Amino acid sequence: MYAIVDIAGKQYKVSEKDKLYVPLQDADVNKSISFDNVLLVVDGETVTIGKPVVKGAKVKAKVLDHVKADKVIVFKKKRRKRYRVKKGHRQPYTQIEIDSITAK
């Protein structure tokens, strides 16, 4: 069984016991969160497509950790003008583990 779920504007294909990184969620570590924007549920031969979401379907997940991605370097330069700017950015993510997928 797997589902396509919309988390913070991004779509993820999830199944039970999957671990994935999603954009930063407002939840504490070891707490449970649920996502209601389930777009598709596949259970064996049964495929349920939402219009736009599947009614009554939920994906429950457990928050494992809050982490940051690798640093992305932004470097700007204009030749012959003595202009150089170097900045770095680390995007925050939340690591979750999918506990259950329910569809009615």
Image (cartoon, rainbow, N blue to C red):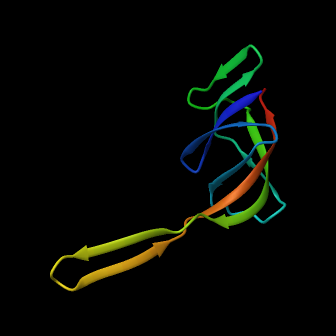
The residue lying furthest to the left in this view is 80
Q: Residue at x 69, y 32 (%)?
A: 3
Q: Position of residue 12 (x, y in %)?
A: 62, 40
The residue lying furthest to the front in this view is 80
- Camera-nearest residue between 94 and 90: 90
Q: Residue at x 78, y 49 (%)?
A: 97
- Camera-nearest residue between 20 and 76: 76
Question: In the rendered view, would you say 42 is above or below 13?
Answer: above
Question: In the rendered view, would you say 46 is above or below 28?
Answer: above
Q: Which quarter of the image is occupied by the C terminus? A: top right
Q: Position of residue 58 (x, y in %)?
A: 75, 38
Q: Position of residue 35 (x, y in %)?
A: 70, 45
Question: In the rendered view, would you say 84 is above or below 19?
Answer: below
- Camera-nearest residue between 1 and 87: 87
Place residue 27 in its image quadrant: bottom right
Q: Position of residue 33 (x, y in %)?
A: 77, 52
Q: Which quarter of the image is occupied by the N terminus? A: top right
Place residue 100 in its image quadrant: top right
Q: Residue at x 71, y 23 (%)?
A: 42
Place residue 98 in its image quadrant: top right
Left or right of residue 75: residue 8: right
Q: Residue at x 80, y 33 (%)?
A: 102
